[in-house]
Amino acid sequence: MYIKQSDLFRGVRMDFLRKVMQFTHQESHLQGTELFHASDPATHFFILINGRIQLSLGETGRRVYIGDQRGESFGWAALVGKKIYTASALCLEAVDLLKIDVSQFKKLLVSDLDDGFVFYRNLSEALARRLIYCYRQMPVIVEAQ
């Protein structure tokens, strides 16, 4: 079960995972496939099984992140209150992934507050890691004295 390999689901009960799998679909995409575009409605989030994806900002296409770790999540804009994706996701090579319906997932989170809390704690840790990664990619600006 690939979903167990995602840090987002670390510590949730098996019954919760079984319910999530009811509205999760495994998909394969070819290199060059755009999974979603910035400003598209944020209806799903994804867990990478294998391959590499690139996240880019808006119309500039500025690369902000490369995802290549099994179990890595992306496209979670709707999970943090956004109605649209804030980045675009492009397959840099053939990928296999899990696609999870956000509306059904949110209903499950509301009905299972204990596992919902664990999930959101894990999501906040993943967001913190991604933010630190982005900080490290920024050029250092030295201010004049």
Image (spheres, helix red, strand yellow):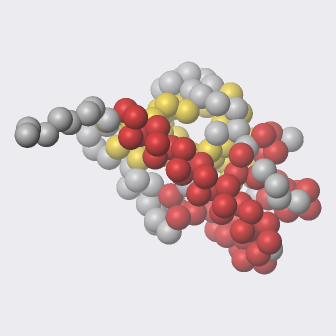
Residue 93 visible in image? yes
The part of the image, by quadrant, that contains residue 88 is: top left
Foreground: 93 or 9?
9
Q: Is residue 41 above or below residue 51?
A: below
Task: Name which residue lies at 82% across and 45% down.
Answer: 4
x, y percent for residue 103: 64, 68
x, y percent for residue 89: 48, 39
Residue 117 in the figure: left or right of residue 15: left
Q: Which residue lies furthest to the front in this view?
A: 145
x, y percent for residue 43: 56, 60
Task: Name which residue lies at 46% across and 37% down.
Answer: 133
The part of the image, by quadrant, that contains residue 122 is: bottom right
Task: Name which residue lies at 53% across and 50% down.
Answer: 128
Foreground: 144 or 129?
144
Task: Name which residue lies at 64% across and 30% down.
Answer: 69
Foreground: 19 or 115?
115
**Rendered-image quadrant of the N terminus:** top right
